Amino acid sequence: MNASLTMPVHRLAVSLLLIGVLSACSPLWGTYSPPVTQTPPAWTLDPPTPAATWTPVSPSPTSTPLPPTATPTLSVSATSAPQMLYYSQSGDYLPVVASHFGVDVSEIASPVVLLEMILLDPGTVLVIPYRLGKTTPDERIMPDSEVVFSATAIDFNVEAYVAGAGGHLSIYREYLASSAWTTGAGAIRRIAEENSLNPRLILALLEYESHWVTGQPTNLAETEYPLGNIDWYYKGLFRQLMWAARKLSAGYYGWRDGTLTELTFPDGTTIRLSPQLNAGTVALQYYFSQTYNPDEWAQVIDPHVGFPALYAQMFGDPWARAQVVEPLFPPGLTQPSLSLPFEPGKVWSFSSGPHAAWDREGALAALDFAPPSAESGCVKSNHWVLASAPGLVVRSGGGVVALDLDGDGHEQTGWVLVYLHVSTKDRAPLGAWLNADDPIGHPSCEGGVHTGTHLHFVRKYNGEWVLAAGPLPFTLSGWVAHAGEKPYEGTLTKGDQVVTAIPNGSFETGIVRTPDE
């Protein structure tokens, strides 16, 4: 591809028994060795072109109005708004689609029976009133599988690519309290793993903003703030990567759960997101809206001269890779049977959840459990965290154990359970096959900011965090997770039993796994 690429202009602005454990989780460190070496292609960046002028768009041509001559075969609510055909995407369910279109669930019709809190099969035809008017561009610029840590990342070796590119990133090192001296490639790989983001995307963002991958930063801003967020708190590569991971996750999962429907730019401008977009595209539109105002932003997301064009030059056609692995959530997907991750007969505390899978923003996918203790805070626990299902340990270290339930050895495919804050002592080793109820290790305070000993537990499927209270609710020994009014304040229910999460713990948060569960 020989598209002319416009590079960005940087902005310079400067309980007695149960213990409570968690108010927020911050990044944890794991270990992983990419399996295949890949050498980056050579590419040439053409001179910049003038900035494109962005005009908010009306409904996409792919949102086809219902033909006036069509004979209705389904009930459509009476409305003066035009009726649009929408084909559901991976991860869609009715309340989310309704939020994207700004309509009520009752206004959505289909030739097939629709259930409100069930994943829609990709490609399901929906008829929806269109009332939004002007929106962001509705062209999809990045598949979901190139944003999350999906199977498209299995054959990608970050260290080999960075070394072959030969830019500033290849010689960069940064001292981190959690891992001492860390290479640039190591930081990219760890951020990708921890946040379940595609490393290709992170590398391309770094190249687009500051040329770190293939060249050298050209000014102080590019050197100290290589992803363009000029904020002293995020100075240095690793903090810039943390910030980027937060914003990409907020965009992707905010669209996935229906809470993100518009963009707000630094100048205060707001614009509605096109309901035709996929989560991967929204992740990028949202990410770039954090640092660019509308006219610049339009140029950045332009698939011909902006970031998508650079991405294709660096890594080839992302849509071709996506065809092999998508949809990430296939038709009929269900959660496998999972048990509570601790010993039967022991009273643990449901201390918080659902909350962010990793760090501060993103998918509300995690549940937290604290072991019995007569003391609060970070105390040693001899209680065991157990495997909720059989699987292969594909990551073990830095407080993390990742259990691959399909046993193919890849964290990017199928169901994966991620256990966080697991102590080094007695932790299940990399490569171990565990049966259900085999020990994972002991709960602890290892691996991030915390207020007490606990277990942070989360699911992924095909590299995407799975919302704990979404259409595939986190279900453990028959206990079903539900969201609260705020993150951390949800409930677990089983029949008429309800346990409400309380971060600092109390007797009422106790939950017991019975011997037959």
Image: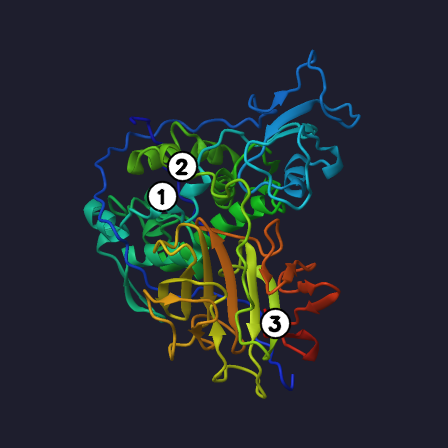
Residue displayed at 27% across by 33% down: 45
Do the residues under discs 2 and 3 have CB atoms within 8 angstroms?
no
| Earlier residue among tags 2 and 3 | 2
Disc 3: CA contacts within 10 A as few (<14), some (14-19) or many (>=20): many
Say which residue label 2 marks.
322
Say which residue label 1 marks.
152
Disc 2: CA contacts within 10 A as few (<14), some (14-19) or many (>=20): some
| Earlier residue among tags 1 and 2 | 1
The local secondary structure at tag 3 comes to strand
Mark 3 is on which residue type? Ser
Residue 235: tell me if it is visible: no
Quadrant where the image shows the C terminus: bottom right
Do the residues under discs 1 and 2 have CB atoms within 8 angstroms?
yes
Residue 87: tell me if it is visible: yes
Please give the label number shown on residue 351.
Answer: 3
Please give the label number shown on residue 299.
Answer: none
User: Marks 1 and 3, how far apart in space?
Assistant: 35 Å
Residue displayed at 68% across by 41% down: 115
Quadrant where the image shows the N terminus: top left
- The answer to whether 86 appears left or right of 283 in the picture is right
Name the one closer to the observer, 496 or 295: 496
| Earlier residue among tags 1 and 3 | 1
The local secondary structure at tag 1 comes to helix
